[in-house]
Image (cartoon, helix red, strand yellow):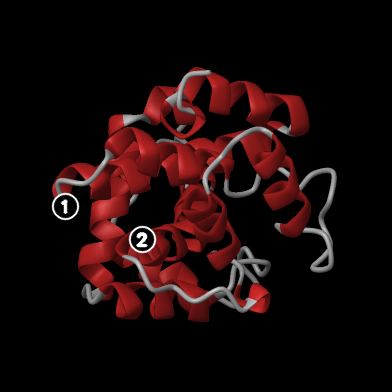
Amino acid sequence: MKDAAHDRDYCHSILTEYTKSESLLKHAYAVESCVRAYAEKLNEDVKYWGNVALLHDFDYEKYPTETEHPYKGNEILKEKGFDEEFRKTILSHADYTGELRDTLLKKVLFACDELAGFITAVTYVRPNKDINEVEVKSVKKKMKDKAFARAVNRDDIKNGAEQLGVDLDEHIAFCIDAMKRDKSKLGL
């Protein structure tokens, strides 16, 4: 069998097998866009990094509780032949798993996860719902509004940039640019 972790078509088929929600699919693509962009910037394995991001929440729709997600996904991916590092990286994106963020990919995935969702939410309230209208200052302004996208953990956004060792404004700008590159796929 081809290396599962490097086969985007295979990973995408797993994602769409378990995830039917358009918003969850778009979230997976948005996180993938940000993580792939970091992989390119840092001269890392773009396919591997992108596929980790693509599958980080694939089990969430069917198994949304903290006792199930991302543990069920870990079991499923193990059965499908994904390596331990791939699976541990996905486990690390949820604080409650206790999986240490001890690799650059784990830090990047965590840093991009909540932020990609938040940038998407900010895009949806722009006049034309176009990511080209989103700026760092508008993202930061909305971060202060606790009623806006209240499910998004602002501390995770800040801590993610900090753990990555990147200035928050720079990180936000980088992710906006990454998502702009894939705006048609993201529906933004």
Please report contact status of discs 1 and 2: CB closer than 8 Å, yes or no: yes
The C terminus: image quadrant = top left
Residue placed under numbered mark 1 in the picture: 42
Inspect this view and state whether residue 9 appears. Answer: yes
Q: Is residue 84 above or below residue 139?
A: above
For residue 180, the mark is: none
Q: What residue do we see at 66% from left, 43% from top?
A: 78
Q: Residues within 10 Å of mark 1 (few under 14, many from 20)?
A: few
Foreground residue, 157 or 100?
Answer: 100
Report the label total: 2
Which badge, 1 or 2, is on the more N-terminal residue?
Answer: 1
Q: Is residue 18 above or below residue 141?
A: above
Which quadrant of the view contains residue 149?
bottom right
* Residue 89 image position (x, y, % from top left): 50, 58
Q: Furthest residue to the front?
A: 1
Which quadrant of the view contains residue 107?
bottom left
Residue at disc 2, secondary structure: helix
* Residue 88 image position (x, y, % from top left): 54, 60
* Residue 54 image position (x, y, % from top left): 52, 39
Q: What residue do we see at 50% from left, 47% from top?
A: 120
Q: Is residue 74 above or below residue 54?
A: below
Residue placed under numbered mark 2 in the picture: 108
Disc 2 residue type? Answer: Val
Foreground residue, 128 or 114?
Answer: 114
* Residue 18 image position (x, y, % from top left): 76, 32
Q: Is residue 49 above or below residue 141?
A: above
Foreground residue, 167 or 78?
Answer: 78
Q: What residue do we see at 49% from left, 76% from top?
A: 100
Disc 1/disc 2 C-alpha distance (Å): 11 Å
